[in-house]
């Protein structure tokens, strides 16, 4: 009878111990099966993200002046600037910002320039354009059916940073003709990486067409 009592207690303890160990494991297993599997879309920002504080965190590596009275400052983030000195193509994680201005005019309607022929900036253009390179983009991240390998485009209101409503299809189509990594200004990037001086480039074409 005593032996039976101890055997019963031992059996009860064994069952209780098993319950304490197995039940939580089963619960964790069920929970893991119900959870959403990890994927790039679970952690990535949908579409191109607005790079807040880009003037402070990024580097202005070039300025492009066009005869139509526009000036565009080109910025690149630290990832892209560090990679351009070592690789032919820009690394994943590169972000480029194009910030534009109208040129100031005098009372006669002529553009105000300095001794080097550089325009004086007036009011900013209504939007900034952002290019971002990732190893993965979901289809929903694109605003165009065109593609530039790992590059995507975004347009944001200059004043607020909100998404600017405009078609970006022309951006993809234009950059398809760039000879290096769908990017026209890699020479200016490399020049800045070696000299630390932003390049001032006089473009002969107007609008957003590729410079000659």
Image (spheres, grey):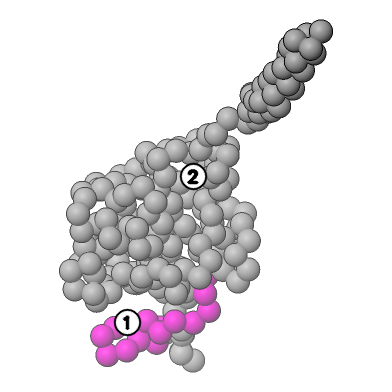
What residue sits 52% from the left and 51% below the top? 48
Residue located 75% across and 15% down the image: 6
17 on left or right of 130: right
Q: Is residue 16 left or right of residue 105?
A: right
Please give the range of residues in magenta.
111-125
Q: Position of residue 152 (x, y in %)?
A: 45, 46
**Mark 1, residues whose alpha carbon is within 10 Å: few (<14), some, or many (≥20)?**
some
Numbered label attached to residue 169: 2
Give whichever of 200, 33 is nearer the camera. Answer: 33
Mark sitting earlier along the chain (2/1): 1
Asked whether residue 117 is drawn in magenta, I would say: yes
145 is higher (above) or lower (below) than 116: above
Image quarter of the C terminus: bottom left
* Residue nearest the observer in this picture, 90 or 79: 79
Residue denoted by label 1: 118
Query: Could one spot residue 15 in this view of the protein?
Result: no
Mark 1 secondary-structure assignment = loop
Q: Is residue 80 above or below residue 107?
A: above
Q: Judge whether 7 appears above or below 126 on screen.
A: above
The residue sitting at 60% across, 65% down in the picture is 161
Crowd rating for badge 2 (residues with CA inside 10 Å; few <14, some 14–19, many 20+): some
Q: Does residue 8 sit above or below 199 in this rendering? A: above
* Residue 144 on the magenta segment: no
Q: From the viewer's perspective, is 114 left or right of 48? A: left
Local SS, label 2: helix
Residue 137 in view in this figure? yes
- Residue 145 drawn at (x, y percent): 50, 35
């Amino acid at each position: 009878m005593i032996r039976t009592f101890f055997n019963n207690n031992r059996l009860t303890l064994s069952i209780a111990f098993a319950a304490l160990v197995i039940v939580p494991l089963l619960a964790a297993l069920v929970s893991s099966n119900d959870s959403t599997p990890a994927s790039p879309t679970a952690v990535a920002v949908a579409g191109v993200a607005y790079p807040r504080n880009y003037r402070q965190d990024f580097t202005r590596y070039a300025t492009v002046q066009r005869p139509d009275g526009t000036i565009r400052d080109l910025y690149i983030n630290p990832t892209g600037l560090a990679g351009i000195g070592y690789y032919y193509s820009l690394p994943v994680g590169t972000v480029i910002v194009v910030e534009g201005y109208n040129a100031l005019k005098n009372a006669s309607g002529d553009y105000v320039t300095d001794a080097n022929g550089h325009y004086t900036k007036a009011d900013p253009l209504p939007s900034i354009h952002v290019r971002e390179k990732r190893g993965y983009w979901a289809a929903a991240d694109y605003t165009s059916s065109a593609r530039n390998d790992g590059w995507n485009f975004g347009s944001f209101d200059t004043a607020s940073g909100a998404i600017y409503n405009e078609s970006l299809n022309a951006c993809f189509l234009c950059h398809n003709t760039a000879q290096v990594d769908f990017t026209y200004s890699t020479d200016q990037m490399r020049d800045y990486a070696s000299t630390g001086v932003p390049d001032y480039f006089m473009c002969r074409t107007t609008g957003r067409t590729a410079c000659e």
